[in-house]
């Protein structure tokens, strides 16, 4: 089906051919309608609606373009709209509930006739039992004769598909429900009860005909300074008010910090962390003007290189503007005796270190320190072997076995991922020796200059690749270029020719680094290969050096 005409838009819902569809963050399936958001095609109209005819083996939606050809939407951006089932879409037959589906019948399908046909009346329900000369017809045996329900040009039947549930689908919430309020970047739930001094309230109703004057605004958030025995608020911290904000009149609700939120009947916990692709987030504040506002609920479909979230082609600011909504039903199962886990944080006096793999020896069910652990490498803990659940993350037995194997050898270049004694996160070192009998301080180190640099434990370090090790040997991050370096130009748009050897100089006017070669200074960004670091260049006058290309 090509571009659809007669589509009526209703906020986040559309209507087509008398059927309502709702915007969805879920992947498209056959039968969905999509609104194409890409431009640059002659045969697909930006902003137009198309029906998804099928999903190919790569999981990409296929549509029929404006020229009548199948079009692969791979890599294109579009909005998905899914059919909203109405009561008329659901029928009951012989005690079973079915959904009416507009598609070609297959042998064995149950079919509902909606138009009269040959020996078939509108309203008949029968099993499609036999192939017909008309491939888009439904047929049954009737007194030895084949009877058909034609489907050419006009819908004369629906296929009935059994319902797994009688409950009609609800659109995914895109806004925070009115039962909650976001204030100063935090989520609060409204409670209908008497307020206490010091609590925060929101004005929910204000009848000027009752108070004879306008002193507060509906939606205003205030802190209670004085409340009478009837629960009426007499004074607030923010300013002087002449009126009484009444409890029995339903003029306020108490705001209590919320750790979870109920959306569409499902509970979600609130987590202050970075979201992963596919997770839903709640906007709790907006630093700059953008397409999203406080209270919007969004699904992250991309994370930019600098940590911004993307929904479609519009970027939402960083994680500090959102909280992650985690379905309560998908919380990790509580660890059991015999499970393996990785230490992911330290919130108590637990003796494990971040990165350690442990085995659960005991679970006493307490809220604090419920899990007694042992290290799988046989080393002793530095003190308390009892951990909290939020300090541990389950890992598989295969991962535990892999972690138990010796990960390093003499000569490996390593980087610290945790502070340990005199060593700090990010430090680069080389393993000098390994003490096979050590219980903790197992690895003797040299610094990048070859000087002895103490000892450390397994969980504090990770092996770095050859490229990072090469740069670490000269005390730099990967790709770090400094003034005085000898470099080769590997790419150029308006600079020196590719292959030119030059000296990096600092441009004091623009405060950036440029390349001097053949008496000319030109700019190159990310297109340079280090030939010799500045520290190894001795007695070279960059302005006189022969830096001709080769």
Image (spheres, rainbow, N blue to C red):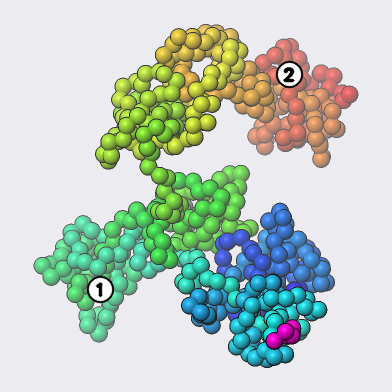
Locate residue 383 relative to residue 315 in the image: left or right: left
Locate residue 261 relative to residue 16 in the image: left or right: left
Looking at the picture, does residue 434 appear above or below residue 389? above
Q: Compare residues 334 and 275 and report the one nearer the observer.
A: 334
- Quarter of the image holding residue 89? bottom right
Q: Residue under circle 1? A: 251
Specify whether residue 208 is in view: yes
Q: CA distance from mark 1 to mark 2?
A: 74 Å
Looking at the picture, does residue 452 appear above or below residue 460? above
Q: Position of residue 493 (x, y in %)?
A: 81, 40
* Magenta region, main secondary structure: strand
- Quarter of the image holding residue 35? bottom right
Q: Please tell me which residue is depicted at 20% across the width and 71% down the height of the picture.
A: 247
Q: Are marks 1 and 2 in contact (CB under 8 Å)?
A: no
Q: Please tell me which residue is depicted at 57% across the width and 62% down the height of the picture.
A: 25
Q: Residues within 10 Å of mark 2 (few under 14, many from 20)?
A: some
Locate residue 246 relative to residue 518 in the image: left or right: left
Of circles 1 and 2, the one toward us is 1
Q: Position of residue 478 (x, y in %)?
A: 65, 28
Q: Residue under circle 2? A: 532
**SS type, badge 1:** loop
Looking at the picture, does residue 305 appear above or below residue 526? below
Query: Farthest residue toward the left?
Result: 229
**SS type, badge 2:** strand
Q: Which residues are magenta?
A: 143-148
Q: Position of residue 257 (x, y in %)?
A: 31, 55
Magenta stretch: residue 260 in it? no
């Amino acid at each position: 089906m090509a571009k659809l005409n007669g589509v009526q838009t209703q906020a986040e819902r559309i209507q087509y051919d008398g059927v309502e569809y709702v915007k969805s963050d879920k992947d498209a399936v056959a039968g969905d309608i999509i609104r194409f958001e890409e431009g640059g095609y002659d045969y697909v109209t930006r902003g137009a609606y198309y029906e998804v005819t099928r999903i190919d083996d790569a999981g990409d939606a296929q549509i029929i373009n404006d020229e009548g050809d199948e079009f692969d939407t791979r890599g294109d951006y579009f909005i998905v709209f899914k059919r909203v089932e109405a009561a008329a879409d659901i029928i009951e037959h012989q005690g079973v509930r079915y959904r009416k589906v507009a598609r070609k019948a297959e042998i064995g399908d149950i079919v509902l006739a909606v138009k009269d046909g040959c020996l078939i009346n509108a309203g008949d329900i029968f099993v499609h039992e036999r192939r017909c000369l008309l491939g888009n017809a439904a047929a049954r045996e009737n007194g030895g004769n084949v009877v058909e329900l034609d489907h050419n040009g006009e819908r004369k039947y629906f296929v009935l598909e059994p319902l797994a549930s009688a409950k009609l689908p609800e659109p995914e919430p895109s806004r925070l429900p009115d039962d909650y309020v976001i204030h100063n970047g935090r989520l609060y739930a409204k409670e209908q009860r008497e307020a206490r001094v010091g609590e925060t309230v929101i004005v929910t109703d204000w009848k000027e005909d009752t108070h004879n004057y306008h002193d507060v605004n509906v939606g205003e958030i205030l802190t209670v300074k004085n409340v009478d025995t009837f629960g009426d608020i007499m004074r607030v911290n923010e300013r002087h008010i002449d009126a009484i904000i009444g409890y029995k009149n339903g003029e306020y609700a108490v705001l209590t910090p919320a750790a979870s939120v109920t959306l569409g009947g499902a509970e979600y916990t609130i987590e202050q962390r970075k979201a992963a692709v596919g997770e839903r987030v709640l906007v709790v504040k907006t630093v700059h003007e953008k397409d999203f506002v406080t209270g919007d609920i969004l699904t992250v479909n991309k994370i930019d290189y600098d940590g911004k979230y993307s929904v479609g082609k519009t970027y939402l600011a960083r994680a500090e503007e959102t909280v992650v909504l985690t379905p309560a039903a998908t919380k990790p199962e509580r660890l059991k005796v015999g499970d393996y886990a990785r230490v992911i944080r330290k919130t108590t006096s637990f003796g494990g270190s971040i990165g350690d793999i442990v085995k659960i020896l005991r679970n006493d069910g307490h809220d604090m320190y419920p899990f007694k652990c042992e290290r799988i490498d046989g080393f002793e803990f530095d003190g308390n072997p009892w951990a909290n659940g939020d300090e541990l993350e389950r890992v598989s037995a295969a991962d535990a076995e892999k972690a138990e194997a010796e990960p390093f050898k003499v000569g490996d270049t390593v980087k610290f991922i945790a502070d340990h004694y005199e060593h700090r996160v990010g430090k680069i070192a080389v393993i000098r020796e390994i003490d096979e009998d050590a219980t903790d301080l197992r690895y003797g180190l040299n610094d990048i200059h070859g000087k002895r640099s103490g000892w450390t434990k397994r969980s504090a370090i990770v092996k770095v690749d050859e490229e990072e090790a090469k740069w670490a040997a000269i005390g730099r991050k990967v790709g770090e270029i400094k003034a005085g370096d000898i470099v080769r130009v590997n790419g150029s748009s308006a600079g020196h020719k590719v292959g030119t050897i030059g000296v990096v100089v600092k441009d004091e006017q623009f405060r950036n680094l440029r390349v001097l070669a053949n008496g000319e200074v030109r700019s190159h960004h990310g297109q340079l290969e280090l030939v010799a670091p500045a520290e190894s260049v001795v007695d070279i006058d960059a302005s006189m050096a022969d830096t001709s290309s080769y």
